[in-house]
Image (spheres, coloured by chain):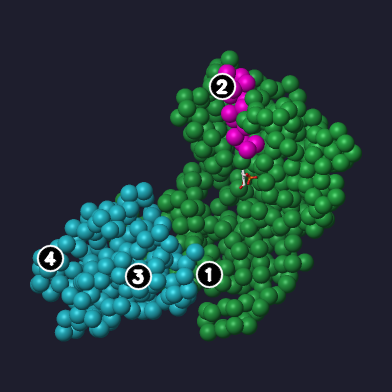
Chain colours: A cyan, B green
Amino acid sequence: MYNEKVMEHFENPRNVGEIAEADGVGQVGNPVCGDIMRISIKVKDDRIQDIKFKTFGCGAAIATSSMVTELVKGKTLDEALAISNRTVADALGGLPPVKMHCSNLAADALHLAIDDYRRRHGQGDGTDASVKDKVAAGSDEDKCPGCCGKIGRAVAEGPRPAE
Amino acid sequence: MTSERVIAGMATSDGGGAGERFRSVYLDHAATTPVRREVAEAMAHYMLTDYGNASSVHSFGRRAAEATEEARARVADLMGARPEEVVFMSGGTEADNMSIRGSLAAYSDRGRHVVTTKIEHHAVLHTCEELEKEGLAEVTYLPVDRTATVDPDDVAKAIRPDTVLVSVMFANNEVGTIQPIMEIGRTCREKGVLFHTDAVQAFGAVPFSVDEMGIDLMSVSSHKLYGPKGVGALYVRKGRRIRPLIHGGGHERKRRAGTSNVPGVVGFGLAAELARKEMDDRVRRLTALRDRLIDGLLGRVEFSHLNGHPTRRLPNNVNVSFEFVEGESILLSLDKKGIAASSGSACTSGSLEPSHVLLAMGIPPEVAHGSVRMTLGTQNTDEDVDYVLEVLPGVIERLRAMSPLHAKAVAERAREAAGRPGERCESGPVTPGAR
Ligand SMILES: Cc1ncc(COP(=O)(O)O)c(C=O)c1O
């Protein structure tokens, strides 16, 4: 079902955990649907200095979470925002079609974390309001009409201290 | 025994590299079983030597017909039925389709109401839904309790003057719960409605008596009892009418057209015969393995729950939910260690929702996602159970270390233990953000 690269990330996920004093945290998904991805970031000089994830979900959910952290570590925030769920799936060499919509939300969690960081640092909501909108409405790319409407119901958690 | 073989795996995980050795443990016997060697050999004879068409008059045909009738008697024996009440067909799915559609068609003068349950196999549920769409049936779907048991009183209350058929499965394929079939059968008899039971999982696993159980129609399938795939049977009580689904030649006493699948039927018959002979031994061995596996898992892994009835369950069924982790992840991890299991999570059910059975039992979706079904077979050994008990807790631990839900639950528990319940986080430990 999954290719070798996906399985490799599933078995040896990078950057698992939660940053103790994160600068930004983003979470998407819903346990009822079977996937939750939570990403925390540490930002320095407008770059993602450190990033960690925690994910409850299937093999694709874990592999995409791992991959997104690998893709953006050290990148500027704008570079990180340019990464989409599709970029992540492509970097993994593709996902089974059914997983594209339901378990491929890691970039959304990342974008929410960046959004959270910017809000906390007085950069307002405006810089990337599109993220919130997208997560609230579901973009065309990610729309999943058949399922529980995961993106539509995505939970954008506000800033909260790490546990 | 095959399950004891140790195979050289090409495990890539944990730097184990090629040559890492692990057991191969098949624990998905509810999905299908291996064909017994003597069964496969008996079948080969009717493909290679006595390959005649059972409807032909010549000796090739007569030998095939004799073998078919012997098989019919063996299957009937395991049911506690008479041979002429057994109709061979392509499997459990066809038997379920035919019993519902065929009895509604035959008894349309009585009405078109069907009583069934929310936990039936899709072969029953989708047939009912289709008949509703076609305007040929009105269906009542009964609820079940937390153990997946149907209340016979609910059955009695649901029966109306226009009820034709009650269809309640004998044992559930996911959680193994065995239904109060006797009581339901008695109710149906009293109310004068037909009683169908999908016994695909139970047939060969527990003793049967269609008369004592008040069964009018019963679906069974060969590949769940160490016989070949693509063969099954419908038991039709003598005197009960049924309209065929498949039209053509007059095979199976005009109830199921199509050239007899002689090798398949012969294999099914022998598998049924072996199940009858070995029944007591199988029940004893599997129950012991099952209970050791259940107790071992619940004892070793916190936040785990048995799904289904603790005692009224199939001797080979283990179904456990591990909170805070998702089933497909567990299956992939187990598969890497040579363990084949299944799950009721959305990702593995092929649909986008977790198992309809677990949901009907009132299990929260997030817990249903973490369910793992392990169904034992005659080839499994104590060593297989030991191996699973050794591997599975580590798999759950690794996935929980990655799960945001687990950290929360543990923190929550620590706070509660410290006697400061006031510091609960705003949402529950299991369902942050759930509505
Ligand atoms: C309860 C139940 N009913 C029906 C079926 C379908 O049987 P078959 O695979 O022979 O069509 C199955 C098998 O998956 C089953 O478990």
Closer to the eye: label 3 or 1: 3
Question: Mark 4 or mark 3, which is nearer the start of the sequence?
Answer: 3
Residue identified by numbered label 2: B163
Q: In the rendering, which numbered label is found on residue A90?
A: 3
Residue identified by numbered label 1: B333
- Report crowding for label 3: few under 14, some 14 to 19, many 20 or more residues within 10 A (C-alpha): few
Which residues, given as a range, are shown in magenta?
Answer: B94-108
Q: Is residue A121 left or right of residue B140?
A: left
In space, the residues marked 2 and 3 are separated at their CA atoms by 55 Å
Residue closest to the far front: B58
Quarter of the image holding residue A158? bottom left
The chain ID associated with circle 2 is: B
**Image location (x, y in percent) of residue B124:** 56, 37
In space, the residues marked 1 and 4 are separated at their CA atoms by 40 Å
Residue identified by numbered label 4: A125
Looking at the rendered structure, the kind of residue marked 3 is Asp
Quarter of the image holding residue B67? top right
In space, the residues marked 2 and 1 are separated at their CA atoms by 47 Å
The chain ID associated with circle 3 is: A
Work out which quarter of the rendered image holds the N terminus of chain B and state it: bottom right
Whether residue B281 is visible to the viewer of this picture, yes or no, is no
In space, the residues marked 3 and 4 are separated at their CA atoms by 29 Å
**Image location (x, y in percent) of residue A58:** 44, 63
**Image location (x, y in percent) of residue B215:** 70, 30
Question: Mark 1 or mark 2, which is nearer the start of the sequence?
Answer: 2
Q: Residue at x 49, y 45 (%)?
A: B356
Closer to the eye: label 2 or 3: 3
